[in-house]
Amino acid sequence: MAFPGSSPEERATARPPPRNPESADSTARAEQEWRPPYQSELAIGAIAEDGAVHLNAFAAALAEADEAWIEAEKERQLAEIARRREMIRRVRPAARPAGRSVIVVDDGIATGATMIAALHTVRAERLRELVVAVPVAPPDRVAAIRPLCDRLVCLHERDDFQAVGQCYDSFPQVADDRVLDLLRAAARPLAAAPVP
């Protein structure tokens, strides 16, 4: 669980113990946001690990978002997803979600593009239940995403929402090596998993 104002490392490592640790599992996925080069906080869409593309409605109005740009960006993002997936799978095998309850978490929802792409992909895996858990999001995005899952938990809906980063005291990018360290720590039993 993550809280506005926490650091990326606190967001990555804070986790309550599962009710039945033997049946609990966790994994990481590599969905990618698409951002125009002139606006680093604006996600115009996202691509899921399976190649499914979700573009936000306003993307069509952007001059850059023509068919050629979309195809080139799709190839670039798929290459990055493959790199990240290979890196993650070295330390964390893919979970088998069919027939299970799945909780999809993120550090917050801005446009919702990444979450929507992830939910469409995960939903296809015949889950028992699909839950979204985020610390912060604007109310209109919560309303748009709620029909795509069985349950949505958002700790703080902000009417003045502008970007996920505004809700944290510190919001830097997390380096790949740090991600791998955190995934290794999360794989150890809770009592023996100090934060590296």
Image: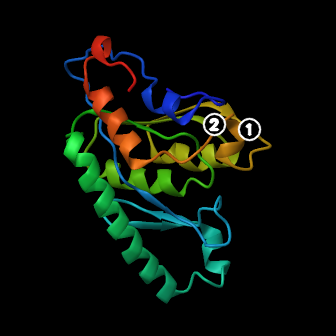
Q: Residue at x 53, y 36 (%)?
A: 8
Circle nearer the N terminus (1, 2): 2
Label 1 secondary element: loop
Task: Residue 135: give x, y in percent of width and height.
Answer: 59, 33
In this picture, residue 190 sits left or right of residue 71: left
In this picture, residue 78 sits left or right of residue 188: right
The answer to which of 143 and 174 lies nearer the viewer is 174
Residue 51 is labelled as none
Classify residue 100 by image quadrant.
top left
Q: Residue at x 43, y 82 (%)?
A: 72
The relative height of residue 75 versus residue 124 in the rendered view (above or below) is below
- The answer, for residue 86, to whether it is visible in the render is yes
Q: Which residue is drawn at 22% across and 36% down?
A: 99
Q: What residue type is labelled 1?
A: Arg
Image quadrant holding the C terminus, namely top left
In this picture, residue 167 sits left or right of residue 123: right
- The answer, for residue 94, to whether it is visible in the render is no
Classify residue 38 by image quadrant.
bottom right
Q: How far apart are marks 1 and 2 (CA)?
A: 7 Å
Q: Which residue is drawn at 29% across and 52% down?
A: 124
Task: Residue 102: give x, y in percent of width and height.
Answer: 34, 35
Label 2 secondary element: strand
Q: Which amino acid does label 2 sit on?
A: Val
- Find disc 2 in the rendering and name its residue: 136
Q: Which residue lies furthest to the right in this view?
A: 160
Task: Residue 95: give x, y in percent of width and height.
Answer: 22, 39
The relative height of residue 33 versus residue 139 in the rendered view (above or below) is below
Q: How many neighbours does mark 2 have within 10 angstroms: few (below 14), some (14-19), or many (20 or more)?
A: many
Asked if the residue under mark 2 is in contact with the one under mark 1, i.e. CB atoms within 8 Å, the reply is: yes
- Find disc 1 in the rendering and name its residue: 158
